[in-house]
Image: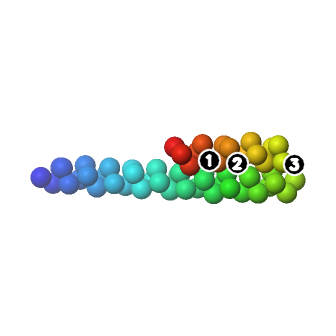
Amino acid sequence: MEEREGRKMREREREGARTVQREGAGRLLNELVEIGLMCMGGEVALQMLLMLILYNAY
């Protein structure tokens, strides 16, 4: 019984770590899109926006 609970707890911790990684990467992509809009021109910003959409779909 304790082993099963321990396994469940470890799995929840792993899932939490994955969520934090995804959210961190999403924020980074948001920043890259903003930089692209301000500095690099529309085409690059559009490519970055598409990357962000694809990433969020994952």
Secondary structure state at the residue bearing disc 2: helix
Q: Residue at x 55, y 56 (%)?
A: 23
Discs 2, 1 touching: Cβ within 8 Å: yes
Q: Amino acid at mark 2?
A: Leu
Q: Amino acid at mark 3?
A: Gly
Amino acid on which the number 1 mark rests in the picture: Ile
Q: Counting other residues with Cα less than 10 Å from the Cα at mark 2, is it few (<14), some (14-19), or many (20 or more)?
A: some
Residues at discs 3 and 2 in contact (Cβ within 8 Å) = no
Residue 31 percent location from the top left of the image:
72, 57
The numbered dot on residue 30 is: none
55 versus 13 height, above or below: above
Q: Position of residue 15 (x, y in %)?
A: 39, 51
Q: How is the image coloured?
A: rainbow
Which residue is denoted by mark 2 in the rendering? Answer: 49
Q: Residue at x 74, y 42 (%)?
A: 47
Mark 3, residue position: 41
Q: Which residue is mark 1?
A: 53
Q: CA distance from mark 3 to mark 2?
A: 12 Å
